[in-house]
Image: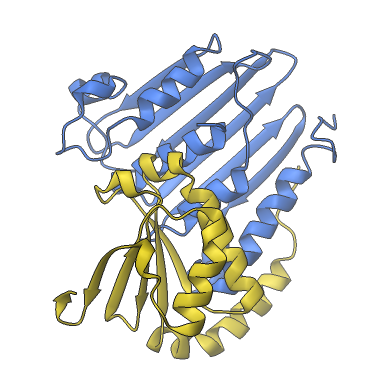
Chain colours: A blue, B yellow
Amino acid sequence: MLELALHVLDAMRNSVDAGADRLELSILEDREQDRMMIELTDNGQGMARELAEKVLDPFVTTRKTRHVGLGLPLFAAAAHRCDGDFQVRSAPGEGTRLTAVFRYNHWDRAPLGDMPSSLLAILLAERPVDVLYTHRVGSRQFCFDSSEIRQELGDLPLSLPSVRTWMLKALQEGERGLRDSGGQFLD
Amino acid sequence: MLKLKSVDELKKLREEAQRAFHVRTQTSTRIIIGMGTCGIAAGAREVMHAILKELEQRKIEANVETTSCIGMCVKEPLVDIEQGGVTRVTYGNIKVDMVPRLIEEHLVKGKIVPEWVVGRLGAEGII
């Protein structure tokens, strides 16, 4: 995958397939510590310990566990090749938490990429899913909680054409606020 | 901290949307894009983006949904177009530059693009 945002989208899709309807995604870019951390927590069905230990191995995939495949091994490989770390914590009925850590300035670290599109792709999933998204770059922070929007809309879905356009714009605007026009840090 | 602005704008959108919602659900067009690992790796997110852009430019009000892997990974990105809840056409290996023609032919002219179809479902089953 060319962007970390694509790995994140893939992981969020796993959560939806595991029955989650509430995701918490946090991205932390810490230039001073030369560290980047991506953490995704869901309220899906969770996994038994044996499965959670095996999900990073691409060759133990079974068709019964459809949410397991190449996605997580690729995400983990992306972190490991950047002097990073990848952890999966999960328990049946308690959801799953993924933590990916990267050395920020590592030559092989893929750019974060287009997070607004990844978030929109998951907010347009076939059944309602909410994401609390926090992106911190240095001292700046952007927060987006789709459940606030859902509340505002009442019984209308997030997938309405005017709403999806509005959400994409809001996400792009928020992300832009973290960097200058050249993509550099503002702080 | 940066926060979401323009909530008033959202309220306005809600009022407008509520008026049109009922009509739209009765005559809906659904576009479904596969967003499993295979789809994502093949460029499905960009295809979704291109579809949303094309719909907006042409002012076509279709529902766009993403879904997970349906098991035909070699044909990703897969795009299904369902109309009136009856006919459903699955297109395979859809790239960003194919999107304008797909929307033009299928949604504007009402004609299927046969060379891109990998499956069709009609009122009487697979056709």
Residue that protrudes farthest toward the top in the picture: A83
Q: Whole-percent x and y of residue B41?
A: 44, 39
Q: Hey, which quadrant is residue B11 in on the image?
A: bottom right
* In this picture, residue A139 sits left or right of residue B111: right
Residue A146: x and y in percent read: 54, 56
Q: Is residue A163 visible?
A: yes
In the displayed image of the protein, which residue is found farthest to the front? B115
What quarter of the picture does the N terminus of chain B occupy? top right
Observer-nearest residue: A57 or B10? Answer: A57
Question: Residue B43 location in percent, x, y?
Answer: 49, 45
Specify whether B84 is left or right of A157. left
Residue for point 37% across, 41% down? B38
Residue sitting at x 62%, y 79%: B59
Q: Residue at x 71, y 38 (%)?
A: A141
- Vertical relation: B67 (above or below) B112: above
Quarter where residue B50 is shown: bottom right
Looking at the picture, tell me which residue is in the foreground, B57 or B92.
B92
Q: How many marks?
A: 0
Note whether A99 is above or below A96 in the view shown. above
Indicate the position of residue A9 as horizontal and vertical percent values: 47, 42
At 57% from the left and 17% from the top, the residue drawn is A102
Is residue A147 visible in this depiction of the protein? no
Judge left or right: residue A6 versus residue A59.
Answer: right
Quarter in which the C terminus of chain B is drawn: bottom left
Position above or below: A38 against A105: below
Q: Nearer the viewer, residue A5 or A15?
A: A5
